Image (spheres, grey):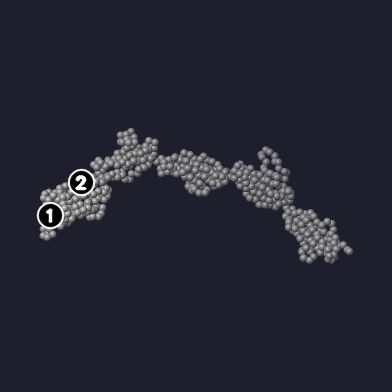
Amino acid sequence: LVQYSQLGAFGVLDAAGCKALFFQSSMSYVRCALLFYFCTVVVAVSGVHLELNPRTLQNRKTGENFAVQCKIKDATQADVLGYPKWFHAMPTGADQPIPSTGRVGVKQIDPFTSNLLFTKAERSDEGTYKCIAQTTAGNVLAQSIDLKLYEKIQFFDTPTTQHPRDGSDAVIVCHVKADPPASILWFRNDQLITEESERKYKLLNGNSELLIPTFSVERDNGIYRCEAIQEETGDFQSLEITVEAYVKPEITFISPSTEVFEKSQAHLLCTATGTPRPEISWLKGGHRIASDKKYEINSQSGEMVINDVDSEDAGIYTCQAENSVESTTETVNLNVFLMPKVVPMSNVEVKKGDNMELLCKFSGGKPMSVVWKHKDMIFEEPVDGFESNLPERYAVHAEEDSLTLHVFQLELNDSGLFECVATNKAGSNSASLNVSVIYSPVITKSNDGIVRAVNGQEVTLFCEASAVPPPTWTWLSSSGSELFTDETKYFVNTSVNQLSSSLKVVMSDIQDYGRYACKADNGVGETALHSIDVVQIRK
């Protein structure tokens, strides 16, 4: 008679043989050995016994959930001391009791039944599990079960879409984790792939890699199937792998070298094939062009629109087609035909009778037509071999970037607007200046004859002149002194355009009579001087 350390009871073994367990009497501390069968033998007393269900746990998969029920059979509650308890047999040391909670735990169903529960079983759970119960008669009932797990087939590091490179040897992978190990087979179009096929496949690393020599998109793209079989367990898994080769980019079209007008839009197009679809980018001078208001770039269609083209946009542009395989480039030359530009000119003043040269400087795309315009006249350089039809006083001389208009012995009708107009196929532009033909004043109108007056009378003297620029007026008395408005005797008034002036005199004594003079001066040539005599009429 011995006591089991966890049950605190005594028992008698009615058979010999499987395993020795040690028990200790709580009263006498006498140690002795007691042999139990922990196989499929039920230790029974008076018909009471343990029953496990299921009876075997062979070939269970890791990661699965399952349970083992331990039930006391043919007993009443008075026959047993507590519900059945579960232990995990250790290779060394004491067996470990299974707690009621945890990933591996025990759940009591009723006084006669305990379930051993496995949640997401792991390889470390393998081993022998014992169910122990005690009867009121002092007997220990025991039953054991062996748990053997196998690792179910798992695919890892195996993309379901794989992209070898077209034209190169391709290695398609199917990595399988399983215990016991699984055999791997390859299929395409439900046909088993072997190394003896005409395609000269190679199976590497335990068939986990399929080598396809010199991969061809047309011949080898498609769906392949990898099958893994555990012969010992019968477990079977398959995985479909889509194989689509990556193809290096090839530029199929690029806009030819082209010419566009300044201020217009330039459209450049570049298309390419490849897998994955290439991204198109544009470069100039080795620098990638970013899409903005100036440059509108569609990386998918390959079109670049250059807005408001100017001279800086001319040059060589590079189209780059790039995918994960590599990149390729082509170039196109863009010429910009410039609109005419005429350098602004300043107004000029020239003396009547002098000679004048007007210089017009211009730039822009050639050929270009450049002319001078004045009123209804057009001045241009004569065509080689033809005589000039210009008036005698005019001549035109052209240089590469300028046109000079010569005007000899300027006349008054040469005054006014002169315009230089440059025209090419991109458009036209012009600049203008105003020519003022200046001359000294000429008195054109004054009081008629002699002015007669009496004392107390107001006399108004006036002069009108023609002059460019308008003159400054001065009135002189008979003594030669300059007269100014004094608000009593003399009143001087000059017109807004300064082309006329008047002097009002209040006649009061003999000194007020005599010769007055108007003087007009504009700084050009001689001063104009005109005399007016005022005589007294005696009553």
Q: Which mark is residue 137?
A: 1
Q: Which residue occupies the foreground of this view, 240 or 539?
A: 240
Q: Which is nearer the N-term, disc 2 or disc 1?
A: 2
Residue lying furthest top in this view? 198
Circle 1 packing at 10 Å, graded few (<14), some (14-19), many (20+), is some
Please give the name of the residue rendered at 67% of the width and 50% of the height, measured from the top-left corner: 433
Please give the name of the residue rendered at 25% of the width and 46% of the height, measured from the top-left corner: 61
Which percent across, then down, holds residue 172?
34, 41
Please give the name of the residue rendered at 30% of the width and 40% of the height, measured from the top-left corner: 227
What type is the residue that disc 2 sits on? Thr
Q: In which quadrant is the N terminus drawn?
A: bottom left
Does 478 appear above or below 278? below
Is residue 371 visible in the rendered image? The answer is yes
Is residue 529 visible in the rendered image? The answer is no
From the viewer's perspective, tell me whether residue 366 is left or right of residue 477.
left
Please give the name of the residue rendered at 46% of the width and 43% of the height, measured from the top-left corner: 300
Does 440 appear above or below 183? below
Are the two marked residues, 2 and 1, in contact with CB atoms closer than 8 angstroms? no
Q: Which mark is residue 314?
A: none
> Considering the numbered disc 2 on the image, is that residue within a helix, a strand or a loop?
loop
Q: Quadrant of residue 152?
A: top left
From the viewer's perspective, tell me whether residue 14 is left or right of residue 170.
left
Q: In which quadrant is the C terminus drawn?
A: bottom right
Q: Which mark is residue 56?
A: 2
Q: Which tag is nearer the camera, tag 2 or tag 1?
A: 1
What type is the residue that disc 1 sits on? Ala
Query: How many angstroms separate mark 2 from mark 1 (CA)?
Result: 29 Å
Q: Which residue occupies the foreground of this view, 313 or 8?
A: 8
